[in-house]
């Protein structure tokens, strides 16, 4: 039995070797090809499906697709994309005038029907983006280049939600098949996708914006190991590497032919505290934790140069951000607060996290080490993603390391979605906060909303459902042959303006 | 090792060797002796050194992280193997990791060896349905990628030292089963087994007294070879995020987590790697010497 | 002969059915909800319920099993939860990459260990023999991923000889194949050496020597032929280990193979994909066994079909 099996295996191998000789090809980078490696793998190219809220999907969305509007992080206002102008007819009615002459990659015209399909499709796909557009009641098309979106109640976040809604051709059915041959209006069109290896996009010659894209071909390369990704940009096998740790950045800075840069993100890394579980129901314990964690030490050593200490519950890049007073690192005060809460000798607890963000493991170890100094004994539990999610959603945890923010760049995306009592995410509940969130979401006046979000940030900072650690920066290392690329103002980047010299 | 002279159907050559001179005077005997002594020394060091070298996994010194080997720390001590990404002394981590790694490897080999051998014995001795079921299972097990099986089992069991031991035992039992099965098939037809049966010995007595002692040699040899494989499997589990849970230090964990720093702080992954390689080599040497001594024809 | 093949086919079908059933149960015992993993941190109870409905996970297990088996009989392995493509298509798309890697490293290990083992046996107990023994122990003792990353740093980054990642030309294959084969070379070298030494002590070798054949001639003309079967047997036994190593090597070298596919499918609780991958593995295993049995039966008249 065993002998026979082995012989079979050897024969099989021989046959495969013959096939192997036939399959050999050598791939040299063609001129004008830009190769980019990001830290997330591509799950799906469908912008509305289950992967629709992944950072990688949004990055691809900037190249393959267009959105109606975009948020300008520098000017702090919305800019036209496929929508030229928009206005509130009344608080529940939005009118958009669309850009004319825009064509999809397959030659079809972009019209109001595409907008209607895209909106209806994202809701029908029941993916993570669906709740953002759930308040949409109807989409009307008075003429092919005019869209009227009606919502049940006033929705202050509609424009910011539209910045991440990719426009797909009219009539696209709500099935994930679309992701196999995606069609958009973006600067690059789909050519080939080899899962876990590369996504090849070619320049869209009919792009509506003059002179864009600059590169002829764009390849997203998947390199899971971070050391290998850094090596690939050093050897010139890729042109841009994103998401490198500080040690690699420090080293690559000294390499000739490689430039490194960091750019801001809309993200915040936080230690979530389950305020529905004792002893964390006591605000004094939560305050003790705020004073027991040395945020500056963590930021300056583990994530040096790729993060700044948090100054609020949202990143400074997010709309309506307000700077909060700094919290002192004071173990004596922390011990005193713990004693007042009835834990002079500390207590036992645990922290849960999963791999996914840079330095998650080191940060968790640092938190465990620092809390040990005030007598809190933390069991450090790394979990496989599926189990971690299960525990996270069921509130079956004491501490969590959470990376919040991103998305639409709107504070609602972080604050209401995660800290509202209804969201059942952190176990924390505050009626005043909830009311502020509901009111802000229902207002279409940005100034009014910001006033409410400012108060909300104060409540979170003071009540401590989390210890906010740092705002990560995104790190980019790129070859000097890449021209016209600079670190973008948020983590969702586009290389449509980057050119490559041979 | 061998219980009775009569139970040595194929040991005749060796026995004349051994009876002519004390075993320590033969070349093979001497080699067995010094490799055994080395293995004992490594074991004692691995189990005992943690009592001498202090290491606290939660005592971090973030300001002195990623220091090269030989750097003098703020407290005057020298970090001979450098410090890790959290500023902990790597020497302490490696010394304490030795105990976990060696215990895991040894206990999984013992567990897989004992259960695998028992199953092989049952299959080979009783034949019939037990044979079919056990040996087909073993075939399946051997054909299925061990690491993938480990991923599934580890995911079901959850993270703990005991579960890592269980997982690594489950992926190795079939090797021993197949080995034991082959030996038993040959032995059960042998004259001394038939003689024992004719005298009315019970099955248990035959297995325990006559078959088991005669099939131990190859099993012990293969077991020593498996120790190294298990240490590597523990490292591979850590690589996949399913290894020994924190805060326990183990070589697998340290190597796997240090790999992200290979570019800049090579020592984190390399130092425990060197120790692991050394221990695997010592066990391998001992295994070879044991094989040469017990089984001069080199059948296994 | 026809009856023999029919019986073997039936048995093979039984094994595949067994593998199907076992993996169906195992993936459902794994803790974690596929719908939650699909939605990630954006999941809400309502979205999870809707996704579970869409994926058919709300039906009783028994109903799911019957549906699964019925579709399997029709050759439909379902669709991956993450994309529109059929699960089996995704698996088959990965097969060339993994076989390329496994075949290359198997060839490399067999060739290298054959030479090293022969040299070690020919000059047994010499310094050369001890050196080879030590090296093969080291090769067996170095973790795959460590070896792979160090190889990338040395041969790609510093020497710039070889590409550091991905699948492409022959050069892309070198580092992953060498990394994957190291452990195997270590083991096989030792086995080859032991095999040759065992054969060298046997009667036919002594006779050949008595006839005045030089030692190398004995080795080439008599010993190799006789030790092939046990060594090939051992290679077969170790194939599972080799394939296990593929998972790690594929990750380190960004190689788009089956190993990574299965690992991510398990992590994502992508039931159809895991099922399709395991069924594929089982079918390949069973078919190659069957082919070997038939070939043996044809070649060796002494084997009876029972």
Image (tube, coloured by chain):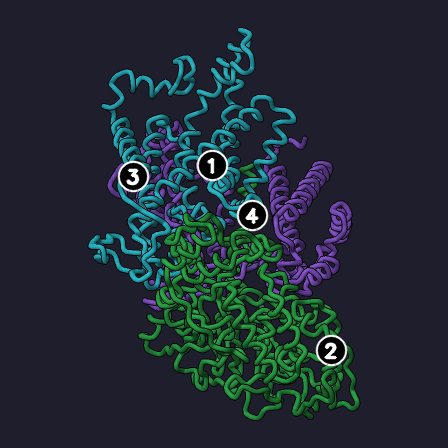
Chain colours: A green, B cyan, C purple
Q: Nearer the viewer, mark 2 or mark 4?
A: 2
Q: Which residue is mark 4?
A: B155
Q: Quadrant of the N terminus of chain C?
A: top right
Which label sits on residue C230?
1
Label 3 crowd (10 A; few <14 / some 14-19 / many >=20) = few
Q: Nearer the viewer, mark 1 or mark 3?
A: 3
Closest to the observer: A231 or A1?
A: A231
Chain name for mark 3: B
Q: Is residue B55 above or below residue A443?
A: above
Pinpoint residue C277: horizontal percent, then vertical percent. 62, 53
Q: Quadrant of the C terminus of chain C?
A: top right
Q: Nearer the viewer, mark 2 or mark 1?
A: 2
* Mark pair 3, 4: CA separation: 33 Å
Task: Give the number of marks.
Answer: 4
C196 with respect to A216 (left or right): left
* Mark pair 3, 2: CA separation: 68 Å
Which label sits on residue B51?
3
Q: Secondary structure at mark 3?
A: helix
Q: Who's the residue at 29% across and 31% down the image?
A: B36
A412 with respect to C65 (left or right): left
Label 1 crowd (10 A; few <14 / some 14-19 / many >=20) = some
Pinpoint residue C128: horizontal percent, then vertical percent. 26, 43
Quadrant for residue C22, please give it: top right
**Marks 2 and 4: same chain?**
no
Q: Is residue A437 above or below residue B31?
A: below
Ranked by sequence position, the earlier of labels 3 and 4 is 3
Pinpoint residue A24: horizontal percent, then vertical percent. 51, 65
**Marks 3 and 4: same chain?**
yes
Q: Are marks 3 and 2 in contact (CB under 8 Å)?
A: no
* Mark pair 2, 1: CA separation: 77 Å
Q: Nearer the viewer, mark 3 or mark 2?
A: 2
């Amino acid at each position: 039995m065993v002998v026979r099996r082995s012989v079979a295996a050897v024969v099989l191998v021989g046959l495969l070797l013959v096939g192997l000789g036939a399959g050999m090809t050598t791939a040299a980078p063609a001129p004008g090809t830009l190769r980019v490696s990001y830290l997330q793998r591509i799950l799906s190219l469908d912008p509305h499906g289950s992967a629709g809220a992944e950072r990688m999907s949004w990055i691809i969305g900037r190249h393959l697709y267009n959105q109606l509007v975009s948020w300008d992080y520098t000017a702090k206002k919305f800019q036209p994309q496929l929508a030229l102008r928009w206005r509130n007819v009344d608080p529940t009615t939005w009118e958009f005038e669309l850009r004319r002459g825009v064509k999809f990659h397959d030659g079809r015209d972009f019209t109001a029907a595409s907008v209607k399909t895209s909106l209806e499709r994202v809701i029908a796909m029941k993916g993570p983006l669906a709740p953002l557009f759930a308040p949409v009641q109807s989409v009307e098309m008075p003429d092919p280049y005019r869209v009227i979106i009606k919502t049940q109640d006033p929705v202050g976040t509609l424009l910011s939600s539209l910045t991440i809604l990719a426009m797909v051709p009219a009539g696209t059915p709500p099935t994930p098949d679309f992701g196999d041959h995606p069609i958009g209006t973006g600067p690059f069109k789909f050519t080939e996708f080899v899962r876990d290896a590369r996504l090849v996009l070619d320049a869209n010659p009919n792009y509506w914006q003059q002179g864009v894209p600059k590169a002829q071909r764009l390849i997203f390369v998947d390199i899971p190991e971070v050391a290998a990704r850094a090596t690939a940009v050093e050897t010139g096998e890729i042109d841009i590497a994103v998401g490198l740790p500080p040690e690699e950045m420090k080293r690559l800075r000294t390499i000739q032919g490689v430039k490194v840069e960091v750019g801001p993100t809309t993200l915040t890394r936080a230690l979530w505290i389950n305020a529905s579980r004792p002893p964390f129901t006591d605000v004094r314990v939560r305050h003790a934790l705020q004073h027991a964690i040395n945020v500056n030490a963590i930021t300056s050593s583990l994530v040096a140069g790729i993060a700044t200490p948090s100054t609020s519950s949202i990143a400074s890049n997010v709309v309506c951000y307000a700077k909060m007073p700094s919290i002192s690192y004071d173990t004596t005060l922390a011990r005193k607060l713990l004693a007042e809460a009835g834990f002079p000798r500390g207590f036992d607890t645990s922290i849960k996290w999963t791999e996914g963000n840079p330095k998650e493991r080191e940060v968790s170890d640092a938190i465990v080490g620092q809390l040990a100094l005030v007598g809190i004994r933390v069991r450090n539990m790394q979990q496989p993603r599926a189990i971690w999610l299960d525990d996270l959603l069921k509130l079956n945890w004491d501490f969590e390391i959470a990376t919040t923010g991103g998305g639409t760049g709107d504070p609602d995306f972080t604050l209401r979605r995660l800290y509202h009592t209804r969201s059942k995410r952190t176990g924390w509940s505050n009626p005043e906060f909830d009311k502020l969130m509901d009111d802000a979401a229902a207002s279409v006046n940005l100034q009014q909303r910001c006033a409410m979000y400012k108060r909300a940030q104060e409540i979170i900072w003071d009540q401590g459902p989390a210890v906010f650690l740092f705002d990560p920066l995104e790190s980019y290392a790129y070859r000097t042959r890449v021209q016209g690329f600079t670190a973008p103002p948020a983590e969702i980047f586009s290389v449509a303006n980057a050119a490559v010299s041979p | 090792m061998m219980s009775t002279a009569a139970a040595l159907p194929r040991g005749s050559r060796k026995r004349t060797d051994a009876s002519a001179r004390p075993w320590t005077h033969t070349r093979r005997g001497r080699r067995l002796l010094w490799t055994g002594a080395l293995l004992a020394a490594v074991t004692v060091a691995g189990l005992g050194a943690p009592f001498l070298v202090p290491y606290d996994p939660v005592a971090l010194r973030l300001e002195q992280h990623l220091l090269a080997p030989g750097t003098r720390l703020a407290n005057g001590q020298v970090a001979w193997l450098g410090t890790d990404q959290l500023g902990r002394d790597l020497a302490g981590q490696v010394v304490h990791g030795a105990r976990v790694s060696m215990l895991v490897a040894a206990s999984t080999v013992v567990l897989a060896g004992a259960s695998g051998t028992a199953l092989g014995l049952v299959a080979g001795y009783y034949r019939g349905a037990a044979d079919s079921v056990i040996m087909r299972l073993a075939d399946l097990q051997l054909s299925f990628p061990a690491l993938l099986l480990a991923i599934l089992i580890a995911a079901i069991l959850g993270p703990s030292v005991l579960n890592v031991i269980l997982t690594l035992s489950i992926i190795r039992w079939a090797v021993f089963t197949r080995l034991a099965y082959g030996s038993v098939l040959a032995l059960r037809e042998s004259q001394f087994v038939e003689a024992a049966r004719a005298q009315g010995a019970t099955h248990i007595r035959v297995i325990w007294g006559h078959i088991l002692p005669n099939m131990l040699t190859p099993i012990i040899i293969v077991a020593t070879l498996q120790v190294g494989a298990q240490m590597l499997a523990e490292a591979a589990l850590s690589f996949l995020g399913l290894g020994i849970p924190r805060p326990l230090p183990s070589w697998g964990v340290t190597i796997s987590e240090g790999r992200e720093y290979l570019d800049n702080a090579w020592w984190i992954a390399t130092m425990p790697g060197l120790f692991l390689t050394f221990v695997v080599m010592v066990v391998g040497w001992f295994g070879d010497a044991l094989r040469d001594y017990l089984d001069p024809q080199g059948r296994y | 002969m026809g009856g023999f093949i029919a019986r073997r086919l039936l048995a093979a079908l039984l094994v595949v059915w067994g593998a199907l059933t076992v993996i169906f149960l195992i993936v459902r015992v794994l803790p974690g909800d596929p719908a939650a993993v699909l939605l990630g941190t954006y999941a809400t109870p309502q979205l999870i319920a809707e996704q579970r409905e869409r994926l058919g996970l709300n039906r009783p297990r028994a109903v799911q099993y019957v549906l699964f088996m019925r579709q399997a009989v029709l050759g439909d392995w379902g669709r991956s939860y993450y994309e529109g493509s059929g699960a089996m298509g995704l698996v088959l798309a990965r097969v060339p990459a993994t076989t390329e890697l496994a075949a290359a490293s198997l060839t490399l290990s067999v060739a290298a260990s054959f030479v090293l083992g022969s040299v070690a046996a020919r000059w047994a107990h010499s310094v050369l023999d001890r050196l080879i023994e030590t090296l093969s122990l080291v090769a067996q003792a170095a973790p795959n991923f460590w070896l792979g990353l160090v190889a990338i740093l040395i041969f790609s980054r510093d020497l710039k000889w070889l590409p550091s990642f991905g699948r492409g030309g022959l050069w892309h294959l070198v580092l992953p194949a060498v990394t994957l084969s190291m452990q195997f070379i270590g083991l096989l070298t030792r086995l080859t050496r032991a095999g040759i030494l065992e054969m060298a002590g046997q009667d036919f070798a002594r006779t050949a020597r008595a006839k005045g054949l030089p030692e190398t001639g004995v080795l080439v003309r008599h010993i190799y032929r006789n030790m092939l079967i046990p060594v090939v047997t051992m290679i077969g036994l170790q194939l599972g280990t080799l394939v296990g190593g593929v998972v790690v090597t594929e990750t380190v070298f960004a190689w788009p193979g089956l190993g990574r596919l299965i690992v991510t499918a398990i992590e994502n609780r992508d039931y159809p994909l895991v099922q399709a991958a395991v069924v594929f593995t089982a079918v390949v295993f069973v078919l190659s066994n069957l082919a070997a049995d038939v070939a043996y039966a044809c070649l060796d008249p002494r084997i009876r079909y029972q």
